[in-house]
Amino acid sequence: MVDLAKIKLIIWDLDETLWEGTLSDNEALKIREEFVDFIRESLDRGIVHSICSKNDFEVTKEYLVSQDLWGLFVFPSINWSPKGERIKNIIGDMNLRAENILFVDDNTSNLKEATYYCPEIKVCTPDELLLSTSGIYHIGSVDKNRPRLAQYRLLEEKVKSQQQFSSNEAFLMSCHICVEFHEDCLENVERIHELIMRSNQLNYTKYRQDKESLISDLSLPDTKAAYITVKDDFGEYGIVGFYMILNGTVKHYLFSCRTLGMLVEQYVYRKIGCPQFDVVGDVITKLDNTTVPPWINQEGENNGTQRNKGNTGDLKILFKGPCDISQIFSFIEQTASTTAEFTYTNDDGTSVEGYNHTSQLVTSLNATKSDKAKLTEDMPWLDERMLDAASWLENDAIIFSTLTDGNLGIYQHKQTGWQVALCEKYYDLTDPKNWEDYIHKNIFTSGIHFTKEALVDFSEKYQYVSNADGGVTIQNLDVLFNAKKETAKLILVLGSEKAFIGPTKPSYENRHVFHEMLNRKMEAWAKGKKNVYLINIGDYIASQKDYLDTINHFQKHVYFHMAKDILLCLGDGQAEVKMKSKAFLYWITLKGKMKKFLVKLLKRA
């Protein structure tokens, strides 16, 4: 028996399989109607079909058209070459995994060849499949419009068109890909639930949630969720992605393989602020905090976004810092002259915040190559990118957040003297009393899997450096100021001095006091320095309603106004900066209020 539950594509041989007889021998053919009925029913239930046959293409197509069957198949491979590689190419072109493919052929040597090239593929003879065709009636929901077939037809056209371009990037730029976000998830919960249950290659959390529980989560007022639609010059792909963040935890982040290669998942990740979460299992695309696919939304953002053009030119601008900078950046046009360096997750799953700490920046700018090699050798959580600060030297304007300095612990290498930043300063990594909490992840670990041996080794090679009085930050700013271009503008984003009233982790208690102390020292440091500007978050905080969940996270309109003032600092006739309109801000705020109102109505009902 063949289990059809996880099959997304069936690849068919033709002679003595879909029909009785051999086409090239001019025999009288007899179509096996039971298979045709099975194909039509399975198309209605989301399974698509292809062909891998040894025959003449034009003759075969003509016959299938005459039988009204040609339109049932996508990506047909019909020629006289061996089938193994052709099957592998079909699967690759369709962005599918072999484990979700069934190949049907009467010749067992062809079946063996298929499994040689694609070890995970499912194979069977026509007679074996015939015993299982009735199982199709128990799989999926029926949609006579056959949306998956339509989507793969689009993909088929794209693959043919792509062959005319010199590079994949050039092809993608020509497609005019438009990605849109939609928050009316409850109205499309059936399709969203189907994505959750079926997606694998681009499912980053692998959380299989039942529909009733999904509806319940989507109805909660604190849930942030949206489904993603994509269209381009070839047509519309429908709902291809979904994310849901509940109480700061990413429960779902997933995309259909139909958009594989477009980097829609990377685009969306940047747009929602690069939230940190653990990736479960294997995924095709690794997310990062820096990549912006330039071929997506080239003509401007979706959801009614408008742009206000400023007066600019060729000024090279660097946005560098944690979530506050990424949120500010989300309101600003991304061009070839803007670079962003946010918190990112490396290949080992480590959340790299120290990348934007002044101590680690100083190390990255001044340590010798051999000293950097020593640091990465003695600290297994470091990689070369963490100690790369070349962008600091290259840009004409730098927008930099100091929030990381108020959060991370500083550790000095005992042999080289250079400093790195890691985990929360509240929990000293070199203090044995904190080790059990790090090992068992009772506290924030930056995604690192600590062991007792690793912590002992780390404490022998590094020592904790206190920055309680902000002195380390001020010393580092001197180095960073002198390292940038002399004419480069340095715009520093300061921390909030207004206490956040609400549940707070011990590591965040009295953070506003530290911010106040450091801000005064930074104001004194900046006084008289040319091309230095300070953006104080406190100037944009009117009440507790402006906070989100911690003293470092704010409502969207706070970041919007900060972005607007940062552009004023940049506006000297040298650079062009574009920004989303205030009307857009009011629109998304209104949508949020409407959503909460509707949720309350649903609960009352």
Image (tube, grey):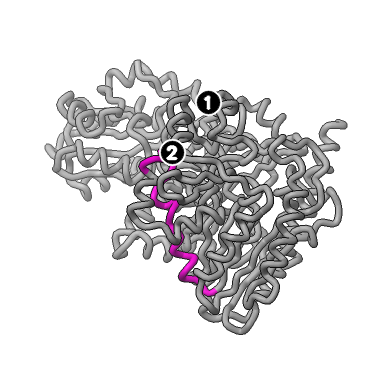
Q: CA distance from mark 1 to mark 2?
A: 19 Å
Depth-wise, is mark 1 or mark 2 nearer the camera? 2
Regarding mark 2 in the picture, which secondary structure is present there?
helix
Q: Position of residue 281 (x, y in %)?
A: 44, 31
Q: Residue furthest bottom?
A: 573
Any part of residue 584 in sight: no
Regarding mark 1 in the picture, which secondary structure is present there?
helix
Residue positioned 50% across, 75% down in the render:
485
Q: Position of residue 28 (x, y in %)?
A: 19, 33
Residue positioned 59% across, 36% down in the render:
428
Q: Amino acid under label 1? A: Ile
Name the image quarter holding residue 596.
Answer: top right
Q: Are marks 1 and 2 in contact (CB under 8 Å)?
A: no
Any part of residue 453 in sight: yes
Above or below for 106 versus 264: above
Q: Amino acid under label 2? A: Lys
Magenta range is 377-396
Disc 1: which residue: 439
Q: Position of residue 53 (x, y in %)?
A: 21, 38
The circle on residue 461 is: 2
Name the image quarter holding residue 506.
Answer: top right
Q: Is residue 393 left or right of residue 572?
A: left
- The answer to whether residue 391 is magenta is yes
